[in-house]
Amino acid sequence: MEEIKVSKIGEVIYHETLENGLNVYLYKKEGFNKKNAFFVTKYGSSYNDFRPIGKDKIKSFPLGIAHFLEHKLFENSDNENTFTKFEKYGANVNAYTTRKETCYYFTCSNYFNECLNLLLDFVGSPYFTIDNVEKEKGIIEQEINMTNDSVIRFIYDKDFYNTLIYDNNKYSVIGDSKNVRKITKEDLYECYNTFYNPSNMTLVVAGDIDIEETLKLIKDNQSKREYQKQDEILLKDFNEPKQVYKEYEECYKNVSTPRISVCYKFVFPKSKGYDLLSILMIFSMILDIKFSSTSSFSKYLRDEKIIKSDLSANYSSFGNVVLLMFDADVLDKERFVKELDKKLKDENYDKKMFELYKKAYISSIVKTYDSPSKVANVIYSHIINYGEFLPDVYDFYNNYTYDKFINDVKKLDFSNKSVIYVTSGKEVNNA
């Protein structure tokens, strides 16, 4: 078993790759009553074009199938609800799907061994039938309709769709009704057998656990299963350009105040590990120094009656693409875009603020290790986002310099952006 020492924190993460390829990470934190386990597959909604295991050619699958599969894994051949099984042990179980991964997890105070076996069993035992697949389609379509009613979610998905051209991340996680209706039992098994192979999965367990005992339980559970030898998963490669798909779109929704979103697109050389973290640090610092709640920019926009609500700012990354997104209830859309462009292209960054946020990042690492569940989240998030767990982030932050940040910012091209304007249409009617 490998011991991974976290720099400057004095904590140890235990890691072992099982014979079937499953990556297991164990974190022991004494004195905590609750224990957590996260079973994660590197399979999200953007993995729609790939070579199924045992096949020769890349195949395209219906949009939203990863999310659909997540739902179906909670159904068992014994017809007993998975949630009910965990509730018997006083445990909470759930799952989520993003564009990058699907994660199944539970939290419990007692009966930890029983719950861990349950997690491994239900994720490792797919049960798809024609009837239960058809039944699920109606449930998913209702979820799609509810999602479409949310203006915030609508804009978020539109940002991806209007900025990306080829990359499958442009499509929403949940898919659409047309694609959901196409999903078959055979499709689900092909996706499951390809991406739910242990060699494509990570199990992270955290809490006041016995390391040796927990590892033995996991090995015993996995030894009972026969997994087909996994070939390398071949995904369709998208050569995503820097340009956006659509520069401007006006959409109509039932909103009392128009809402605007501006999404800037950046394409970098493919990177992973600390090299990728270095790229993402640029955007973390930009957002914190110029657009955080402590900055004056949002107040300026409100005082000038350019926006009505606080400015929302964040970024999303996948592969070698980063999307920098801003949105707000807007009163003057032209000025909003103009002021935003001006703010971003201004290379004047307060060095004191940079050092302040750098200290905050370092402090956040230390605080993370006060919570076993947060540590577990960091471990598998690193693996999904950076390709590996990064134990030396403390040193990385500590050595990250203002001069490097400024030099990297100067290389950014803010000319590739997409604007989405959501209005009720009353402004048009009154014109």
Image (cartoon, rainbow, N blue to C red):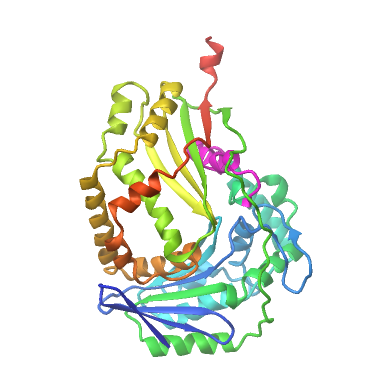
Q: Can residue 91 be seen by looking at this rendering? A: no
Percent x, y of residue 375: 35, 69
- Vertical comparison of 210 with 97: above or below: below
Assign the N terminus to one quadrant of the image: bottom left
Q: Is residue 149 magenta?
A: yes
Occupied quadrant, residue 110: bottom left
| Residue interval drawn in magenta | 146-168
Q: Is residue 217 left or right of residue 68?
A: left
Q: Is residue 179 left or right of residue 413?
A: right
Q: Is residue 294 left or right of residue 236?
A: left
The secondary structure making up most of the magenta span is helix
Percent x, y of residue 311: 36, 35
Residue farthest right in this picture: 56
Residue farthest top in this picture: 431
Percent x, y of residue 108: 39, 73
Depth order, front residue of 220/363: 363
Depth order, front residue of 19/37: 19
Q: Is residue 279 left or right of residue 11?
A: right
Occupied quadrant, residue 212: bottom left
